Image (cartoon, helix red, strand yellow):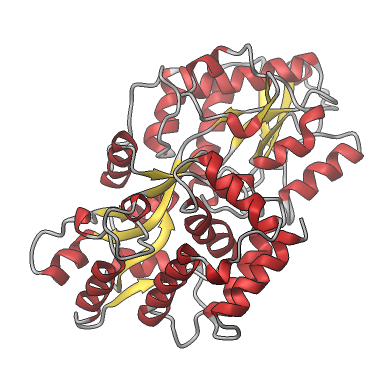
């Protein structure tokens, strides 16, 4: 997922409620504000259109956002114009008193266990999980097959030494670079930092305990083997980065084009990029690799990819009418239970289902690779979903400085520790 809250569905500006048309007067207008990924915005707009055409009781419309979505939400609340549906992550906890409880919803009963813990408030459930996503090294199979001189085996990469060898093999190809490193703060500060914090223990509890210990100044990152191994891996990425001469310059779209065209073999990114990659290279095959942080092949994190629920549908309960809440639930039920809705969800938006009533699965090889890792239990927690709202911009800015050669690893650790001990 593009993790930035500013990446939004292109807004459809429609007329307000004061419409003289008699049919429109009998239609409840349900507004949606959120960040259903920019990569699948057209597909989501198509789903909205299909839903509106399927019934005449509700009209689902999207609201525009200029800038940060959370700021837009709070501004709309302040003006007594809250959207009916909002897409949120951990910020749902900050608005928990304004959100509807889904604990008795049949959709929550269908949701896989563990997919909505982030949005629980006691017995209340503040939102519906939308999908699971994963990030790691997305790779172009054709490039890697050529680099290794045969069929590339993704299971062969579970140490830093093996990753370094693969980087060298790709770099030896003519006009091909090993990896593209995206410099966006959400990629570095939320996703790549997750590899550091999710390797601090064997489960979510120990991951969060480690964060608390860092906050308390009880863990020194500079003296941490995991931290130094994590930076060693990032140093490998910097060394083989396609844009190492201007590492802060490449855009998301440029990196996607580089991977799809075979100009690079790997890109640290997530499966939300698949729709764009497939549009750029419909014949291409793409997979995902872990990010190893040591040369110990038995270290669980070296074999695991980060998997988690990035976002949730929430419904306002503070300013919406009963009819608007009914319409919001009707749309979500359509999306997650109807034949047309689930087809759009799985086959058009390429979401990996998190509901056991949805039998369809994405057919692409990238989603299948993620599902195989999930079934094998080779996953890392999304600790980044438990970060404070300003964590990824802060750590992302520090990592951008490190990527650009402005600070060294000691200073990077210091900036991370300064951030966390201030919380």
- Occupied quadrant, residue 360: top left
Q: Is residue 335 left or right of residue 287?
A: right
Residue at point 67% right, 62% down?
Answer: 393
358 or 27, nearer to the observer: 358
Q: Where is residue 387 in the image (x, y as percent from the top left)?
A: 65, 50
Quadrant of the frame with the C terminus: bottom right
From the viewer's perspective, tell me whether residue 420 is left or right of residue 44: right
Farthest-out residue, left = 150
Residue sitting nearer the eye, 104 or 161? 161
Drawn side of residue 280 relative to residue 196, left or right: left
Residue 307, percent from left and from top: 44, 43
Q: Which residue is drawn at 69% across and 61% down?
A: 217
Q: For the view shown, which residue lies furthest in the front direction?
A: 218
In the depicted structure, whether residue 88 falls above or below residue 355: below
Q: Which residue lies furthest to the bottom in this view?
A: 245
Q: Choose top left, top right, bottom left or bottom right for residue 257.
A: bottom left
Q: Is residue 248 visible?
A: no
Please, is residue 273 above or below residue 338 in the view? Answer: below
| Viewer-side residue, 314 vs 81 | 314
Question: What is the x, y in percent for residue 155?
Answer: 21, 53
Residue found at x 62% / y 49%? 8
Residue 260: x %, y % from top left: 32, 63
Tell which residue pokes out farthest to the right in this image.
Answer: 79
**Residue visible at 16% across and 56% down?**
153
Q: How many labels does the image show?
A: 0
Camera sees residue 304: yes
In this rendering, is residue 419 above or below 117? below
Above or below — where is 267 with respect to 41? Answer: below
């Amino acid at each position: 997922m593009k993790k930035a809250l500013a990446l939004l569905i292109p807004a459809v500006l429609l007329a307000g409620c004061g419409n003289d048309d008699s049919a429109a007067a009998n239609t409840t207008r349900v507004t949606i504000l959120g960040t259903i990924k920019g990569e699948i915005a057209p597909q989501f707009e198509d789903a909205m259109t299909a839903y509106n055409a399927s019934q005449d009781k509700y009209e689902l419309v999207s609201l525009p956002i200029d800038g940060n979505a959370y700021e837009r939400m709070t501004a709309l609340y302040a003006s007594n114009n809250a959207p009916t549906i909002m897409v949120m992550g951990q910020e749902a906890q900050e608005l928990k008193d304004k959100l509807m409880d889904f604990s008795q919803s049949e959709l929550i009963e269908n949701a896989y266990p563990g997919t909505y813990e982030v949005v629980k408030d006691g017995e209340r459930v503040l939102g519906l999980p939308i999908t699971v996503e994963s990030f790691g090294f997305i790779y172009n199979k054709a490039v890697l097959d050529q680099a290794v001189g045969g069929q590339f085996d993704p299971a062969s990469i579970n140490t830093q030494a093996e990753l370094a060898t693969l980087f060298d093999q790709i770099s030896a190809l003519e006009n091909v670079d090993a990896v593209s490193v995206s410099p966006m703060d959400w990629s570095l500060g939320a996703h790549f930092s997750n590899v550091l914090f999710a390797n601090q223990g064997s489960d979510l509890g120990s991951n969060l305990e480690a964060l608390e210990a860092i906050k308390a100044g009880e863990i020194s990152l500079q003296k941490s083997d995991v931290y130094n191994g994590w930076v060693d891996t990032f140093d490998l990425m910097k060394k083989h980065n396609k844009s190492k001469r201007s590492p802060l310059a490449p855009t998301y779209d440029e990196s996607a084009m580089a991977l799809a065209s075979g100009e690079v073999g790997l890109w640290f990114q997530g499966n939300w990029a698949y729709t764009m990659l497939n549009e750029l290279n419909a014949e291409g095959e793409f997979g995902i690799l872990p990010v190893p942080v040591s040369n110990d092949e038995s270290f669980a994190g070296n074999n695991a990819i980060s998997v988690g629920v990035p976002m949730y549908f929430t419904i306002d309960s503070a300013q919406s009418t009963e009819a608007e809440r009914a319409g919001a639930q009707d749309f979500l039920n359509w999306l997650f239970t109807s034949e047309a809705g689930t087809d759009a969800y799985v086959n058009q938006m390429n979401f990996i289902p998190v509901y056991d009533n949805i039998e369809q699965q994405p057919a692409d090889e990238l989603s299948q690779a993620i599902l195989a890792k999930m079934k094998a239990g080779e996953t890392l927690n999304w600790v980044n979903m438990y970060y404070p709202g300003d964590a990824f911009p802060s750590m992302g800015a520090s990592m951008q400085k490190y990527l650009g050669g402005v600070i060294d690893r000691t200073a990077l650790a210091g900036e991370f520790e300064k951030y966390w001990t201030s919380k």
